[in-house]
Image (cartoon, rainbow, N blue to C red):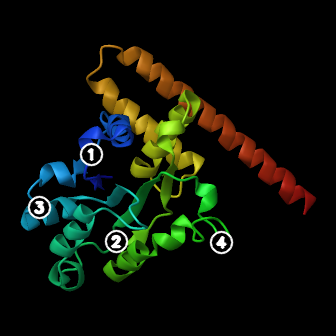
Amino acid sequence: MKTQILVSHPQIRDSGTQKFLETTVKFFQNIFFEPIDIEYPDGNIDVEKEQERLKRADRIIFQFPMYWYQSPDSLSKYMQTVFTRKFVEAQKALAGKELGVVVTTGDSLSQFRLGGSENFTISELMAPYAAFAHKAGMKFLPVFPIEQFAYLDEPQKAKLVGDYAMYVGAKQPLTLDNQTSWIVEQLNAIAEGNNNKEAINLIIDSINSRKDKIDDLKMNIKMIRDEEE
């Protein structure tokens, strides 16, 4: 599965959050990180090139900091320019693909709720992207919010690495099987050109072994439940 991450951030070179996220997926296979503001600093988007990139992708991610409850201008312009009526409706070029949104906030997510200081949930504020996905025949994934990155400690950042990588790369829904399959797939790809191939293969075997044990446990639990019924 190929993932195209479209990043919209006017000061992306100075963004610690975006650098962190880019580094997270840098060595993974089939995940492409595209900073719109760096790719097209003058705003003149190559429509044909972008449409071809999107056609090759199975999953498209809109990634941005939330500015006044919406994305920065570069993503809005990208959508207006690249997602032509011919491309989206006549050709149905995006039909069957997945669309996800990674949004960063300066406020705590606890404020994004009815009665909170923002009074709306993140999902409600991202509804226009869900509407676009519906129109384009895409599957809209649950929104992936990142709150107050600057205040995260090291354990929280370590957790974010795994959660973010899975969100953009692994098959949805994020079941144990899908997560395990993706991790093994990535480790196999890394092992191909790595001097520590034996060590990586041991990790892969260990992951598969644990998965088998969990599968056996699930089967035993099911048998017990069936007997009780």
Say which mark, if any, is on residue 114: 4
| Distance in Å between CA atoms under marks 3 and 1 | 15 Å
User: Which residue position is annotated with label 2?
Assistant: 96
Element at label 4: loop
Element at label 2: loop
Q: In x, y percent, where is residue 90? A: 19, 85
- Give the mark, 4 or 1, whose residue is nearer the N terminus: 1
Give the amino acid type for the residue marked by disc 2 in the picture.
Answer: Gly
| Distance in Å between CA atoms under marks 2 and 3 | 29 Å
Label total for image: 4
Near mark 1 (Cα within 10 A), the count class, few <14, some 14-19 or many ≥20, is some
| Distance in Å between CA atoms under marks 2 and 4 | 33 Å
- Give the mark, 3 or 1, whose residue is nearer the N terminus: 1
Give the amino acid type for the residue marked by disc 3 in the picture.
Answer: Gly
What residue sits 53% from the left and 58% below the top? 173
Element at label 1: helix
- Give the mark, 2 or 1, whose residue is nearer the N terminus: 1
User: Which residue position is annotated with label 3?
Assistant: 43
Q: In x, y percent, where is residue 223? A: 81, 52
User: Which residue position is annotated with label 1?
Assistant: 12
Residue 51's image quarter? bottom left
Give the amino acid type for the residue marked by disc 1 in the picture.
Answer: Ile
